[in-house]
Image: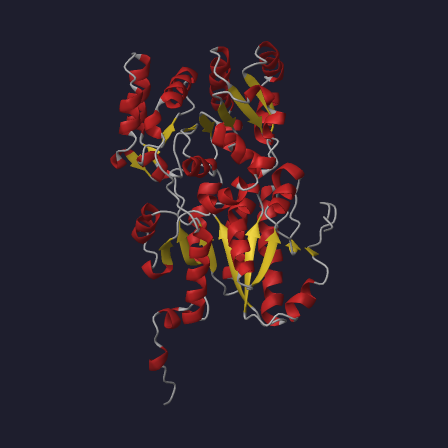
Amino acid sequence: MKIVSCDDKQVFIRPWFYNDIQNKSNKYAHIIMIATKPDIIKQAPIYLELKKRWELVILVHTGQHYDYNLSKWVLTEFWMDVDVNLNIYWEITKKYSLIVERLWDFLKILQEDYKKIPVPYVHWDTMTAATADKASFLSKVSVVHVEAWIRTYTPNKYFYYKLFSDYENWKFDFNEYRKSLKDESIYELWSIEPYPEQFCTRWIEPSTGFFAAPVEFNRKTLITEWFPQENIKVVWNTTSDAIEISKTKMKNSKAFERFPNMKWKQFIFVTIHRRENTQKRERFLVIYYALKKLVQDWVDVCFLWLYASEWAIDNYWLRADIEKLQKDYPDNFAYWPALAHHTEVIDMISKAWAIVSDSGSMQEEWSVLWIPYVTIRFWSDRSETILDGQNVLAPPINSNLIVDIVKWAIWNKKMIKKNLYWKNVSKKIVDWILEVLKTQGKLFRFDDERLDLWYFFNWKI
């Protein structure tokens, strides 16, 4: 498939795409929206399930992540063929407006020229989800929100004041800390982090026609926000399905050829990329020096660099320091670019002693694989993992506190519990969507349709 460059500011359509659409008798066009690597991984099982049922499936890539490591290989890995590339470019505000404008044009063509009813699937809290849903809503189309209601639960300031005060006075106890994080009364819901994703996820729900909630906790909280119960189903998380696909290919993984000093080791797998962690100097320095301390304490640390962490290392003058750390600790420290293949990521984290990251999606992957997880944030948008005790927060305020929490988590077998997200998730989602379309005809409904008032229409004088 030809990939257009950012200089080519046109939408790219696969050759013969509209001919194929014309020849399809399907009434509904299931549009799978993707943009980032996590999007691709989590939307892949739904894409494959719809294909298996001979539905008309259209894969739309915004063009946000199109380099090898972040997109291209994962598409091949999950047998996904892009039909439309919106080819967005420039600053984030420009990207937002381009997705709305270009997707709206595409939906209009599908509706008016090819008489198809679009059924877009958006994922999680991404920029793509928060713009594709707007283009859809303005086209009188409601979206399927995969991983609906991803809200940030943040412990309040009094909790943190006590934590940091106790730590400074040698009163910190990991088991008590982990237990205290299970108390729902300490949390508040007003955070704007992750930025801008937390804004995006709250912005999507009003235009959603079907909420695919990962767990019961999400369903209950959606109802408290006054969204209709009949549109909300607990279907678990498509991460489980994606991991099952990748596990079948693990025998071909070459992950440890990249990281030979981690093979057969009890290593921690580390990624840091959140804007609020990498673009705030104080936070990143806290995280960096915690990792450095772990390495110097002979903990095996596998630190995968991403663009955001590389930017921070260069901008905060840490390049020489990290290169010296690699030289001084060749046996227990690895620092290398992120793995391109999902299979290789799963291979590595399944063999890790713990994961230390600020990633959202990895909080789900380790649960499926039963690996202890330390979240380098003040909060989690996978609150169910914290409340269940499988995940623990390591707030980026004190480097020594992070070190202690990580060391405790590595050896705390109580954190290894169960898969919160089950299996065959994509099948459940597709089953529900096809049933809704069969009974309702569409997801977007004005109030007279939603309230089933057609019988009472009377325009006779």
Closer to the camera in the image, 234 or 170? 234
The reply to whether residue 444 is in sight is no
Image quadrant in which you'd find residue 390: top left
Q: Horizontal and vertical percent for residue 440?
A: 41, 70
Residue 168 falls left or right of residue 146: left
What residue is at 73 percent from the left and 59 percent from the top? 15
Q: How is the image coloured?
A: secondary structure
- The quarter of the image holding the C terminus is bottom left
What residue is at 62 percent from the left and 56 percent from the top? 102
Q: Horizontal and vertical percent for residue 305?
A: 58, 27
Q: Horizontal and vertical percent for residue 41?
A: 54, 45
Residue 203 falls left or right of residue 114: left
Looking at the image, the residue that sits furthest to the front is: 251
Q: Horizontal and vertical percent for residue 65?
A: 62, 42
What residue is at 46 percent from the left and 28 percent from the top? 355
Closer to the camera in the image, 201 or 190? 201
Residue 259 falls left or right of residue 9: left
How many discs mark residues in the rendered view? 0
The reply to whether residue 143 is in sight is yes
Image quadrant in which you'd find residue 450: bottom left
Position of residue 290 relative to residue 363, above or below, is above
